[in-house]
Image (tube, grey):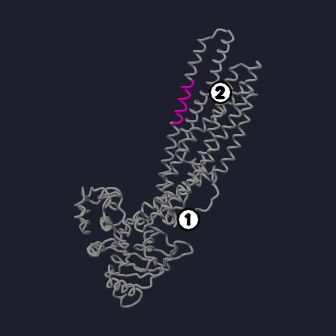
């Protein structure tokens, strides 16, 4: 199905979007001021050029009128011009160099803040945000800020200084002629304001639709096999084409709007230039001014057009920068997890493993509660199996236990200490987890297996691999533990699952969470893994989420969930004898297996 379209949003505040970047620029204020000073030097150097060339023109005119030419004077002017333009180029280049460094440091800080923010945002944020859109904020939006901020910082100061300086020089030559150029400024600014006002929404739409496209591409690539398996290539292409078309349309509108600025301001500047040429020519013919007069004014007129057009271009650049800034700071200003640095830290070796759920209530949304008044007392070393139909709240219990989500009311305690009083990092270190989804990162096999215990030795790693019956497989890999994983590694889903189980063994945590840990292995391997897991769980409090009920027969407690409530509780035999919901589940699976 096609992705739902975003609701039409009003364009955000351009000024507010840019002001959010000010705190990131403050640490480099000295460098910015130095760059501004160098820009002033560069602009001043450019300003004196036409004045000096006017002197050369006057000397040439005197020669035409029959006077001898002062070549020594002209030579001095030529040397002065070379020095002035060299000094100007040095100032502009150095300013550009400094500001480029500033913008790259700002981009670095933004990426760093986003990376740190990801670890502080509640999981519920990721439940409602496409990964591709978030990645687009980290990459495309930050790059847009970097590139556009660099252009605007480098050019804004020099353009404004050059524009002011040009008019100062013009007024020192002829205030009447200078007024003609001054009239063009409000006209240019009026056109600039109108275009900026109506085009900001297009720039914001461009960044948003780019995020949509990235989100779809990330989803399509990660689910490529599923798309092929269900013959949905054409449907996937249609969704891509829709996202691509939306991006094309929004980009076209934003670029068209920005493209209007240069021609309009160029037209106004050329009209001013033509007027100056016409009136200046009349003054020269009338004998009221020399040729050097019109030559200087024409050059200054053209110089005035350049910063005006640059300012118009900067206005476009700032719109794109503001749109990207809004998206980046929307994420940076998201609600964060509560700080827990002042909470308790429980050493692994001192944890007993008693876990208690006291009147726990929870819902992912305020109007949709899924856990109701949940109570359960788990003693050290007990194996707790959690079973029930899809959506009953099995995985939700684990999420609450790990503080991935906070309970709405009630509490969960470990050794009589509420989990809300334990730091999240410390709480995570108390549990070894094996999830249904396997996660192996790019890197060596050794680094993957030591992910939860970086001090583990190769001997300890191989011992755990042997317990998972993966030692022969690892020894057969090129390099053994030094084998490098990447997305192209030819390893089956079952082998990945076995490696994640070995990783949990190596972590050696006092408690375990197994969420359908053997779902990706065959029946024979499952039996071997079950023995290894039984050995691993000895003396450890374990929570096992299982769909195949045959794997949890030896559990000390089986919690049967339905609609967020524990409707039955006991061991396997006790629940079968009750002939209730669990017995129906177990018998239906047994009958299905028998018939198959």
**Where is 530 relative to 190, above or below?**
below
Quadrant of the image occupied by residue 516: bottom left
Residue placed under numbered mark 2 in the picture: 299
Q: Which percent across, then down, holds residue 63?
A: 66, 11
**Where is 29 relative to 574, above or below?**
above
Q: Which percent across, then down, holds residue 425?
A: 42, 63
Are dots 2 and 1 in contact, CB under 8 Å? no
| Foreground pick, 157 / 584 | 584
| Residue 91 sits inside the magenta stretch | yes
Which mark identifies residue 4? Answer: 1
**Cα gap from disc 2 to disc 1, whole angstroms:** 55 Å
**Quadrant of the rendering where the C terminus is positioned:** bottom left
Q: Is residue 496 left or right of residue 18?
A: left
**Where is 206 relative to 186, above or below?**
below
Q: What's the magenta region?
A: 84-96
Q: Could you tell me which residue is drawn at 50 percent across and 79 percent down?
A: 372
Label 1: how many Cα within 10 Å (few below 14, some 14–19, many 20+): few
- Tag 2, which secondary structure? helix
Label 2: how many Cα within 10 Å (few below 14, some 14–19, many 20+): some
Q: Could you tell me which residue is drawn at 59 percent across and 55 percent down?
A: 205
Q: Is residue 178 left or right of residue 258?
A: right
| Residue 117 sits inside the magenta stretch | no
- Tag 1, which secondary structure? loop
Mark closest to the chain's N terminus, 2 or 1: 1
Q: Which percent across, then down, holds residue 518?
A: 33, 73
Q: Main secondary structure of the magenta part?
A: helix
Q: Which percent across, then down, holds residue 477?
A: 25, 59
Quadrant of the image occupied by residue 512: bottom left
């Amino acid at each position: 199905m096609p992705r739902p379209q975003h609701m039409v949003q009003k364009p955000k505040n351009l000024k507010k979007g840019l002001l959010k970047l000010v705190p990131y620029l403050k640490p480099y204020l000295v460098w910015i001021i130095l760059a501004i000073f160098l820009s002033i030097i560069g602009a001043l150097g450019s300003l004196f050029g036409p004045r000096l060339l006017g002197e050369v023109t006057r000397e040439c005119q005197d020669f035409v009128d029959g006077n001898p030419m002062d070549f020594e004077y002209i030579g001095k002017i030529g040397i002065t011009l070379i020095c002035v333009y060299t000094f100007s180029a040095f100032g502009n280049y150095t300013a550009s160099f400094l500001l480029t460094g500033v913008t790259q440091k700002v981009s670095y800080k933004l990426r760093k803040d986003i990376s740190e923010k990801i670890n502080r945002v509640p999981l519920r944020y990721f439940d409602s945000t496409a990964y591709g859109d978030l990645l687009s904020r980290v990459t495309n939006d930050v790059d847009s800020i970097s590139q556009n901020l660099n252009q605007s910082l480098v050019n804004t100061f020099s353009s404004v200084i050059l524009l002011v300086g040009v008019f100062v020089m013009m007024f020192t030559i002829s205030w009447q002629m200078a007024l003609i150029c001054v009239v063009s400024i409000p006209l240019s600014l009026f056109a600039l304001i109108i275009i900026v006002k109506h085009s900001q929404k297009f720039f914001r739409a461009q960044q948003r639709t780019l995020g949509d496209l990235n989100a779809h591409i990330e989803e399509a690539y990660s689910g490529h096999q599923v798309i092929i398996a269900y013959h949905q290539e054409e449907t996937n292409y249609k969704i891509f084409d829709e996202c691509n078309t939306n991006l094309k349309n929004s980009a076209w509108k934003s670029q068209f709007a920005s493209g209007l600025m240069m021609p309009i301001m160029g037209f106004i500047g050329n009209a001013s230039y033509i007027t100056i040429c016409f009136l200046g020519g009349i003054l020269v013919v009338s004998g009221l001014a020399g040729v050097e007069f019109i030559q200087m004014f024409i050059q200054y007129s053209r110089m005035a057009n350049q910063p005006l057009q640059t300012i118009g271009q900067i206005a476009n650049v700032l719109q794109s920068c503001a749109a990207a800034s809004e998206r980046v700071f929307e994420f940076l200003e998201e609600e964060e997890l509560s700080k827990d640095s002042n909470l308790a830290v429980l050493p692994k070796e001192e944890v007993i493993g008693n876990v208690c759920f006291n009147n726990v209530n929870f819902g992912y949304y305020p109007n949709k509660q899924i856990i109701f008044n949940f109570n359960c007392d788990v003693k050290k070393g007990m194996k707790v199996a959690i079973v029930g139909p899809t959506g009953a709240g099995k995985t939700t219990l684990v999420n609450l236990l790990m503080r991935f989500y906070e309970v709405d009311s009630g509490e969960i305690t470990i050794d009589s200490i509420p989990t809300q009083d334990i730091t999240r990092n410390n709480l995570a270190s108390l549990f070894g987890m094996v999830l249904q989804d396997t996660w192996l990162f790019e890197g060596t096999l050794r680094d993957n297996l030591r992910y939860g215990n970086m001090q583990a030795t190769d001997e300890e790693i191989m011992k755990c691999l042997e317990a998972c019956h993966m030692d022969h497989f690892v020894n057969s890999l090129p390099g053994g533990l030094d084998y490098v994983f990447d997305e192209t590694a030819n390893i089956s889903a079952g082998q990945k699952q076995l490696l994640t189980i070995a990783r949990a063994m190596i972590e050696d945590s006092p408690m375990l969470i197994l969420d359908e840990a053997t779902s990706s292995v065959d029946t024979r391997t499952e039996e071997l893994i079950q023995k290894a897991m039984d050995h691993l769980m000895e003396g450890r409090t374990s929570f096992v989420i299982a769909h195949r009920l045959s794997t949890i027969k030896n559990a000390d407690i089986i919690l049967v969930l339905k609609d967020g409530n524990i409707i039955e509780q006991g061991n396997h035999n006790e629940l079968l004898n009750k002939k209730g919901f669990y017995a129906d589940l177990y018998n239906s699976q047994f009958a299905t297996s028998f018939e198959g």
